[in-house]
Image: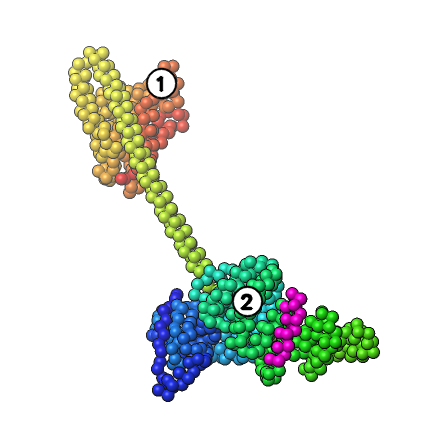
């Protein structure tokens, strides 16, 4: 989230200070200020504060900063959590930047509590970081140690911005001391902690200085499109891209980047970079043998150097002298170097020392080196006598400054000059001096190697300590991230399980509903089928009964017994009316069924009075009205007893119908006859009768099966022989109460 920032200028100076400002208008002064939240006044540390002239700093743990600037300079305040603000400096008044909405997601009280608890750690971090920057150029070991100490207060919950700042500063220290591999590693770690264009610029620069030009270009080129970059950083970007392309012999691209950087430096009056870029453009033209263009830019760099400092003028003059040497313009070279010697003599020794700061060893400007180069120029022209005094001066001054490298080269060169002149005695003396200097240089190199080895061990130990701190922090962060991931995974799993459970419940409910509807539909269909079957069976029973009854009437008519026939038809009509009334019912009262059976048996007895007598015995204790029975269920069994058992008996038989109560909920109705029995009756059947199945008994069995299925086994029928000799038949029907 980007917060808006507002700059408030605090007028703290009196008229006296106003007068002082006028006096300092042409020079630099210290601008103090702070960056805080507008609502809560919580200090914001690590905010980048710079000027368009290249000055740069950051706010400390209290959100405060101090930067050198001149009136008219542009003050630039930027950070990852706030919108970049620019302010033109008009005086040395304090500048406060208030960030609107910073920390608005929490209450002001909570912000103050958190700020108070973390202020000490942030102050320690910033203090150690400032100390590391202070010792960066003078004490390598101290600066690295301060970096390690700056990371300790951050702990496992350190802000990534502060961590990235520490790692970036560590990379800058390594890069300053030409430990480019370590610098690249720490710049990468700083980028992993927090993305920053400044860190990317430093990483690309480290790659270029380490000789990995392609990697440097791949990192730096995308930064060209970045907007709102500080002018000084943009100049450095173009300069580094130019350096990389020049080494890769892409001179056109190198000149393009140098020209872009020079344009921005001139626009923002960044004088040191104007000089550097003019000189590098001249070097690029010199590489292409474009002498006129090279001399023009060299002259521009010299003119600019005169406005900055004498030390810088000497340095740039030496570069021009080197250019003359490359083009074999030895007289111009000698004249310029002698002028540089005069300029150098006018500087104090302290000024020379300060001029050396920030300049690598190979570019150091010293009188012994200039004398040595003047001598080489004379030797190139075969002016050996003119070269000897300068070589001797170079040797004396090098010995005085303990510069064994220049002393060695100058002594060897002097020996060669004497040898070429034929003065072998002095040549031998000079060569012996050369051998002595080489021995001294060898001893010093061994000492330097030993110190370097010890130094490298100390660097490794410090770097391991820093790596351990970073690993501990990463481990803590990993544990926290793992816990968060586990929580998210648990929530996601729970959510997924809930969806699965809900889906299963819904599916089961849907299946249950479907099964229930199918079961109900099937049951209704089965009930409808059973009712239809019962109706069909009852419809079949009625014609069968009527057919048998009409046979009896026909028998009376055949005997010309008109009176008996009329009486039979009258009783038969009563029976038929009752049968038709009950034909649509599944169950009728047992009392009504017994009345119909008694009427039917009476009709059959009137026909076969000589064949059997009958008795209907109903237990008086039975509550007949409490029981119901399917209509016409007993009639076929009685009909079979009469027609197939008693009718063929030689003597007069007996039919007995008795009703007894088995349990409170069950009755037993027995139909017993002492006729010829089922076996004998089957033997007496004709061939035609055997082919025809008994529809009456078959219908009864089907009706009982359907009724029991519909009403849960309310009717049970069993048929057995009455006697052991297979004569007589007993039909037992058990009926449950509804």
Looking at the rendered structure, the secondary structure element under dot 2 is helix
| Residue tagged 2 | 297
Residue in the foreground of this view, choosing between 433 and 310: 310
In which quadrant of the rendered image does the N terminus lie?
A: bottom left
Which residue is at 58% across, 80% downward?
354
Which residue is at 33% across, 43% downward?
513
Which residue is at 50% across, 72% downward?
271
Residue mark closest to the camera, 1 vs 2: 2
Residue 732 relative to residue 176: left or right: left
The residue carrying pointer 2 sits among few (fewer than 14), some (14 to 19) or many (20 or more) residues within 10 Å by Cα, namely many
Location of residue 126 in the rendering, given as x and y in whole percent from the top left corner: 49, 77
- Give, as a single range, the part of the protein colored magenta: 324-343
| Residue tagged 1 | 692
- Residue 80 on the magenta span: no
| Numbered circles on residues, count | 2
Q: From the viewer's perspective, is residue 648 above or below residue 222?
A: above
Q: From the viewer's perspective, is residue 154 above or below residue 554?
A: below
Q: Quadrant of residue 342?
A: bottom right
Q: From the viewer's perspective, is residue 158 above or below residue 482?
A: below
Location of residue 87 in the rendering, given as x and y in whole percent from the top left corner: 38, 73
- Residue 339 on the magenta span: yes
Location of residue 535 in the rendering, given as x and y in whole percent from the top left corner: 27, 28
Asked if residue 129 can be seen in this view, the reply is no
Judged by its main secondary structure, the magenta piece is helix
Residue 560 relative to residue 156: left or right: left
């Amino acid at each position: 989230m980007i917060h808006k920032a507002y700059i408030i200028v605090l007028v703290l100076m009196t008229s006296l200070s106003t007068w002082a400002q006028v006096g300092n208008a042409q020079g630099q002064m210290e601008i103090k200020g702070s960056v805080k939240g507008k609502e809560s006044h919580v200090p914001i540390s690590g905010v980048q504060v710079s000027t368009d002239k290249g000055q740069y700093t950051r706010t400390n743990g209290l959100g405060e900063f101090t930067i050198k600037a001149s009136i008219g300079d542009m003050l630039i305040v930027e950070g990852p959590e706030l919108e970049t603000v620019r302010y033109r400096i008009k005086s040395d008044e304090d500048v406060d930047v208030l960030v609107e909405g910073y920390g608005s997601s929490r209450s002001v009280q909570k912000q103050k509590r958190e700020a108070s608890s973390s202020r000490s750690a942030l102050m320690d971090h910033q203090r150690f970081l400032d100390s590391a920057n202070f010792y960066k150029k003078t004490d390598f070991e101290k600066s690295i140690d301060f970096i390690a100490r700056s990371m300790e207060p951050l702990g496992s919950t350190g802000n990534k911005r502060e961590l990235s700042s520490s790692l970036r500063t560590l990379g800058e220290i390594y890069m300053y001391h030409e430990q480019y591999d370590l610098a690249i590693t720490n710049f990468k770690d700083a980028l992993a902690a927090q993305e920053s264009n400044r860190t990317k610029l430093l990483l690309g620069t480290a790659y270029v200085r380490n000789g990995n030009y392609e990697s440097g270009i791949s990192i730096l080129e995308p930064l060209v499109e970045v907007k709102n970059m500080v002018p000084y950083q943009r100049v450095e970007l173009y300069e580094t891209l130019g350096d990389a392309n020049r080494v890769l012999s892409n001179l056109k691209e190198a000149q393009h980047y140098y020209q872009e950087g020079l344009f921005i430096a001139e626009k923002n009056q960044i004088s040191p970079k104007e000089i550097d870029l003019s000189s590098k453009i001249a070097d690029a033209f010199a590489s292409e043998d474009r002498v006129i263009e090279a001399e023009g830019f060299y002259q521009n760099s010299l003119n600019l150097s005169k406005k900055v400092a004498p030390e810088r003028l000497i340095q740039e003059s030496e570069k021009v002298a080197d250019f003359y040497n490359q083009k074999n313009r030895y007289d111009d070279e000698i004249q310029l170097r002698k002028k540089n010697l005069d300029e150098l003599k006018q500087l104090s020794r302290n000024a020379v020392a300060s001029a050396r700061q920030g300049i690598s060893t190979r570019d150091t400007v010293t009188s012994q080196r200039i004398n040595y180069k003047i001598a080489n120029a004379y030797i190139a022209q075969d002016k050996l006598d003119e070269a000897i005094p300068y070589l001797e001066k170079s040797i004396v001054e090098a010995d005085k400054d303990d510069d064994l490298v220049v002393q060695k080269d100058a002594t060897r060169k002097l020996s060669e000059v004497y040898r070429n002149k034929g003065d072998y005695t002095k040549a031998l003396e000079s060569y012996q001096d050369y051998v002595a200097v080489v021995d001294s240089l060898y001893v010093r190199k061994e000492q330097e190697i030993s110190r370097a080895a010890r130094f490298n061990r100390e660097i490794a130990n410090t770097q391991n300590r820093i790596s351990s701190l970073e690993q501990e922090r990463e481990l803590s962060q990993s544990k926290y991230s793992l816990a968060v991931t586990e929580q998210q995974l648990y929530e996601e799993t729970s959510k997924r399980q809930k969806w699965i459970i809900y889906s299963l419940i819904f599916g089961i409910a849907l299946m249950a509903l479907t099964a229930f509807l199918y079961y109900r539909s099937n049951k209704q269909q089965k009930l409808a089928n059973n009712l239809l079957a019962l109706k069909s069976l009852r419809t079949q029973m009625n014609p069968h009964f009527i057919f048998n009854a009409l046979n009896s009437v026909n028998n009376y008519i055949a005997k010309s017994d008109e009176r008996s026939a009329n009486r039979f038809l009258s009783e038969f009509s009563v029976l038929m009316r009752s049968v038709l009334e009950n034909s649509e019912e599944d169950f009728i009262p047992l009392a009504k069924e017994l009345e119909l059976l008694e009427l039917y048996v009476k009709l059959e007895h009137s026909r076969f009075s000589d064949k059997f007598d009958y008795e209907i015995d109903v237990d008086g204790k039975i509550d007949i009205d409490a029981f119901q029975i399917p209509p016409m269920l007993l009639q076929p069994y009685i009909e079979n007893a009469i027609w197939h058992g008693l009718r063929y008996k030689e003597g007069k038989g007996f039919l007995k119908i008795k009703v007894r109560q088995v349990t409170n909920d069950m009755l037993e109705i027995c139909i017993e006859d002492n006729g010829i029995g089922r076996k004998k009756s089957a033997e007496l059947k004709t061939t035609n009768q055997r082919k025809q199945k008994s529809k009456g008994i078959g219908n009864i069995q089907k009706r009982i099966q359907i009724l029991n299925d519909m009403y849960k086994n309310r009717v049970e029928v069993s048929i057995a022989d009455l006697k052991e000799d297979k004569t007589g038949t007993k039909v037992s029907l058990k009926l449950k109460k509804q």
